[in-house]
């Protein structure tokens, strides 16, 4: 009887050791997958930076280069529309510098957005990124964009030091 108990104990300890090893291997595989995703994301970031640098190095005017950069940005983040706006103090708002994406001919961006009147102008004024994952329920949602079936929006200020120079608005 004593031998049977020892055999069972040995079997139980081997099973326990195997279970620990399975847990270790699963954790190692999960870490490997996280590292692979991070590597893929970094490669995408570098490719995007290279593409943008290539666009900016091409001959052409600023507007053409901006449109190329916005098209690349739209492709990478899978946005339907991307708009770059800069301040126009004379008009007291943000004017469109360049835009890219779907529906620009049928529903062009409003040329001047008064300060405080959009997610983009708020991001510009606050100097902070604003994200509305459920744009129709966002408190400052523009009815025009809701009618255009915008589901989400993000506004990213472009800064130099503490000064906000422009804002990029992305919608999908």
Image: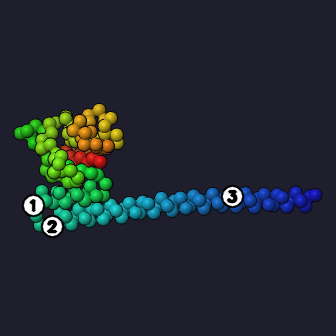
Q: Say which residue appears at 13% left-offset and 39% top-offset.
A: 93
Q: Say which residue appears at 23% left-offset and 58% top-offset.
A: 71
Task: Evaluate if marks 2 and 3 touch, with contact meaning CB atoms under 8 Å apart.
Answer: no
Could you tell me residue 13's position as x and y percent?
77, 58
**Element carrying mark 3:** helix
Residue that badge 2 annotates: 58
Q: Which mark is drawn over residue 19?
A: 3
State which tag comes first along the sequence, 2 or 3. Answer: 3
What is the crowding at mark 2: few (fewer than 14 residues within 10 Å), some, or many (at least 20)? few
Q: Say which residue appears at 52% left-offset and 59% top-offset.
A: 31
Could you tell me residue 87's position as x and y percent?
13, 43
Quarter occupied by the N terminus: bottom right
Q: CA distance from mark 1 to mark 2?
A: 9 Å
Relative to 7, residue 150 above or below: above
Could you tell me residue 22's position as x and y percent?
64, 60
Could you tell me residue 132's position as x and y percent?
32, 40
State which tag comes first along the sequence, 3 or 1. Answer: 3
**Element carrying mark 1:** loop
């Amino acid at each position: 009887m004593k031998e049977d108990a020892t055999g069972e104990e040995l079997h139980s300890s081997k099973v326990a050791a195997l279970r620990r090893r399975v847990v270790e291997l699963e954790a190692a595989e999960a870490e490997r997958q996280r590292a692979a995703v991070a590597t893929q994301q970094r490669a995408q970031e570098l490719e995007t930076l290279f593409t943008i640098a290539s666009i900016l190095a091409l001959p052409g005017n600023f507007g053409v280069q901006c449109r190329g950069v916005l098209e690349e940005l739209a492709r990478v983040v899978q946005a339907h529309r991307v708009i770059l706006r800069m301040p126009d103090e004379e008009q007291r708002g943000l004017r469109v510098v360049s835009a890219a994406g779907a529906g620009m001919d049928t529903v062009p961006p409003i040329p001047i957005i008064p300060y405080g009147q959009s997610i983009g102008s708020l991001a510009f004024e606050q100097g902070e990124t604003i994200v509305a994952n459920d744009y129709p329920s966002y408190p400052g949602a523009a009815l025009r964009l809701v009618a255009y079936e915008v589901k989400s929006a993000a506004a990213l200020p472009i800064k130099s030091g503490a000064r906000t120079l422009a804002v990029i608005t992305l919608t999908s």
